[in-house]
Structure formats: structure tokens, C-alpha cells
Image (cartoon, rainbow, N blue to C red):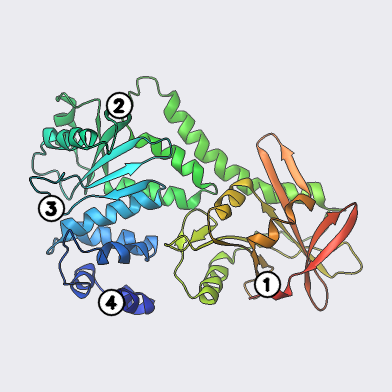
């Protein structure tokens, strides 16, 4: 574990190292079934590094590159929201040689087979036997499982033909690692983690003569983005006492990245991106959501400015999963950031304005500023209440 801590402690140094060097540095320098150092290391790096290492495994092979790719693909599966069981690097007579099992929330299991290339004919019967043996050992249920071959390049025509002409055609699907990475990037762009989990159902075998289900998945992703983007505009329409009148063109603020860096420095941990605005530590000890707002007129003589944020049900559900959660708000710029403990915030949610109109359902977080401090506004028993937020400023 000391080797891992040493590697992770210097982000700039880590970014200069190739994956083959990192594997040599960890543990005994080789990937073995009994060694978990490399898997632990992968759980602590960013999505960008994970993608870079996958590319390194595919661009030029090196000792253990195929085994490393297996772990990287399983880690991508974990970040897509699957409950992942890692397989062995090398099977044996008495052990099942599957590469991984990905379980979805409805308990559907996908048995994973990772290949750097499809240049060589793959034994579909062997993969099917893994599935059969897993069922016999009560690890999965045959009727509630499928198989997924993940290959290192997009040119899979020969493998596709092999599957179509086999008895396993209804149980096996193929995806390239590039497309799997694209799915991870889609998840990063969405606001609600559960949307990505629903989209990932496309990795199961389906007969798409009728394409309604595909259209439903696409619509789900588009709606997720639209609801989040429209929320801030809706706040202005509903809650402003009077419209802002200015001759200037208002451009959206964009200081999310520096706010994230400030939070990481405060927590002194690396954070894994889960969705557009949510992050977590790999050990599930920390979960945070980040929102930013431009400065608005206060419309109140006691204050000089106010800031508006939407707090969505999916953010509440996300923070509920973690031992320690924070709702983090950037007010006007990256220099004014508040890390509000979720335990504190959730006691205030019932006393905030709420938008509920069809698909729109969120609470309004309103922060006011005067010459000395910042305050969270709520409305308790028809009276305005202001909680000082300065203890949470970072």
C-alpha cells in the first residue's frame, strides 16, 4: 500500500509515468491472481488517466498489458455503475476463467470477456462454459445473465459474423473499448447517475427489429441534460421579485473546474467523477455535488447580492449514499466557495422554495451576501430565516 500512496501523492509525477512503469513499481512488478495492488491503484485515479492507460495497453503491447487491460475495463464497468466482480488473470482446472462479472441494479449479470484484438478466433463455447459453471456454482442465474465481449478495436466484422452463426447469438454481444469509454464520457456529461445506469441496459442482448427501446434510451439522455440546463433559468422566472434589467448580454458563468480543484485541496484526496456535477472518493467515504452561480441583485436592502442554485432529487439520492457528503456552492467566482455538510443542509430542505411542474422537481438554494458574510435563506413558519455560512467557506 505504501507504493500506491507514494505514486498517488504526486499527481504531476504520476502523469509522466507510463503504465508499464507503474506495474513494475507496484507489488512484485508482475500482475498475479493473488495481488490486488494494481486494482487498488486503478480505483484511486481519475477517469482521464484510466482512459489513457487503456489506450497504452492497445497501442503497443508490453508484459502483462492484456492483464492490465482486463483490470482497467472492469474499473470502467464499476464507474459506469455496475457492481463488479473481478475475474482471475489466469484460470486453472478448478477455477473459472472469466474476466469479470458486471451486475446491474436489477440483478442482471453480464459475464465479461476482454480481448485486445479480434485477430484470432475466439472460442464462444469457452465463454459460454464460464457462464454455465458460474450458474452451477450459484454465482449467477442463467436466465438472468448474458455475455459481453469487449474488444480493443472497432473492426469486429469477423467476430460479429462468428457470433451470428453460432448457437450463442442470443446470449452474446460485442462492444469496443472505445465505445465503452464513450459511454463513460456520456455518464460524466449527465446530471443523474441513474440515467446512465438505465442507458447501460443496451449492453444486454436485445433484438432491435423494433427500435422503440433504443429511441427511449436516447430520449432519456437528452431529457436529463435539458432538465438540468433549464432549472437555473426556471429559478429566475419563478423567484425573481422583479426581472433584471441590463443592456449587457448575460453569459453563463463557468468556473466549475477551479472550484473542484479547491475542494480537492481542502479534502486532500483525489475525487472520481460520477456525473456532470457529482464526485466521490473511491472508498465511498466522501461524496460531493458542485453547483455554481453568477451574482444576482439582492432585491433586499439588507444585502448586496444573492446566488441561486437548484438542488435536485438525484443530488439528494447521491449524497445519501456516502458516510460524509457535501453540497458545494461557488458564489460568483472560484474564490467564494462553500462546502455545506449534507447533514446540515437536509434539515433545511423542507423550508426552501420548491419547483414541481411535470418533470421539474427541485429545491431552490438561495444564498444572500452582505458586507460581512453569506447566508442560506429559508422560510420557517412564514418568516425569513438566515443561517450564517461562513463556517463552511473554504
What whole-number distance in Å separates the C-alpha atoms at marks 3 and 2? Answer: 27 Å
- Residue 339, label in figure: none
Q: Name the image quarter holding residue 18.
A: bottom left
Q: Position of residue 113 (x, y in %)?
A: 21, 43
Q: Residue at x 55, y 71 (%)?
A: 263
- Residue 392, label in figure: 1
Q: In the rendered structure, are the residues bearing label 3 and label 4 in contact, judged by CB atoms less than 8 Å apart?
A: no
What whole-number distance in Å separates the C-alpha atoms at marks 2 and 1? Answer: 51 Å
Q: In the rendered structure, are the residues bearing label 4 and label 2 in contact, judged by CB atoms less than 8 Å apart?
A: no
Determine which residue is flagged by label 4: 3
| Sequence order check, earlier mark of 4 and 1 | 4
Determine which residue is flagged by label 3: 90
Give neighbour class at mark 2: few <14, some 14-19, many 20+ (Cα, 10 Å).
few
Determine which residue is flagged by label 2: 143
Determine whether, in the image, residue 378 is placed left or right of residue 112.
right
Element on which disc 4 rests: helix
Amino acid at each position: 500500500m505504501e507504493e500506491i500512496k507514494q505514486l498517488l501523492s504526486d499527481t504531476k509525477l504520476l502523469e509522466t509515468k507510463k503504465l508499464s512503469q507503474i506495474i513494475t513499481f507496484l507489488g512484485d512488478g508482475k500482475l498475479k491472481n493473488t495481488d490486488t495492488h494494481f486494482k487498488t491503484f486503478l480505483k484511486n485515479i481519475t477517469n482521464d488517466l484510466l482512459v489513457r492507460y487503456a489506450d497504452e495497453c492497445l497501442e503497443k503491447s508490453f508484459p502483462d498489458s492484456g492483464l492490465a487491460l482486463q483490470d482497467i475495463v472492469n474499473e470502467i464497468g464499476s464507474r459506469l455503475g455496475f457492481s463488479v466482480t473481478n475475474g482471475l488473470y489466469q484460470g486453472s482446472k478448478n477455477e473459472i476463467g472469466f474476466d469479470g462479472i458486471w451486475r446491474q441494479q436489477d440483478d442482471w449479470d453480464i459475464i465479461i470477456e476482454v480481448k485486445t484484438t479480434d485477430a484470432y478466433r475466439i472460442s464462444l463455447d469457452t465463454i459460454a462454459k464460464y457462464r454455465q459453471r458460474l450458474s452451477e456454482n450459484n454465482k449467477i442465474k442463467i436466465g438472468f445473465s448474458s455475455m459481453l465481449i469487449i474488444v480493443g478495436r472497432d473492426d469486429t466484422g469477423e467476430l460479429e459474423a462468428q457470433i451470428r452463426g453460432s448457437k450463442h447469438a442470443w446470449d452474446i454481444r460485442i462492444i469496443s473499448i472505445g465505445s465503452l469509454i464513450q459511454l463513460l464520457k456520456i455518464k460524466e456529461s449527465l446530471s443523474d447517475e441513474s440515467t446512465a445506469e438505465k442507458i447501460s441496459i443496451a449492453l444486454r442482448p436485445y433484438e432491435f427489429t423494433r427500435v422503440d427501446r433504443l429511441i427511449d434510451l436516447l430520449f432519456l439522455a437528452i431529457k436529463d441534460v435539458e432538465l438540468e440546463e433549464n432549472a437555473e433559468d426556471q429559478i429566475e422566472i419563478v423567484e425573481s421579485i422583479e426581472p433584471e434589467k441590463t443592456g449587457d448580454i448575460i453569459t453563463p458563468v463557468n468556473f466549475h473546474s477551479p472550484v473542484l480543484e479547491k475542494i480537492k485541496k481542502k479534502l486532500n484526496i483525489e475525487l472520481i467523477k460520477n456525473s456532470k456535477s457529482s464526485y466521490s472518493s473511491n472508498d465511498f467515504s466522501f461524496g460531493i455535488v458542485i453547483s455554481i452561480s453568477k451574482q444576482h441583485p439582492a432585491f433586499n436592502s439588507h444585502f448586496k447580492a444573492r446566488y441561486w442554485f437548484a438542488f435536485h432529487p438525484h443530488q439528494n439520492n447521491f449524497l445519501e449514499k456516502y458516510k460524509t457528503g457535501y453540497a458545494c456552492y461557488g458564489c460568483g467566482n472560484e474564490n467564494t466557495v462553500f462546502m455545506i455538510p449534507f447533514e446540515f443542509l437536509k434539515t433545511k430542505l423542507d423550508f426552501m422554495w420548491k419547483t414541481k411542474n411535470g418533470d421539474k422537481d427541485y429545491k431552490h438554494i438561495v444564498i444572500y451576501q452582505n458586507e460581512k458574510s453569506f447566508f442560506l435563506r429559508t422560510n420557517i413558519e412564514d418568516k425569513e430565516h438566515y443561517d450564517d455560512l461562513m463556517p463552511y467557506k473554504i
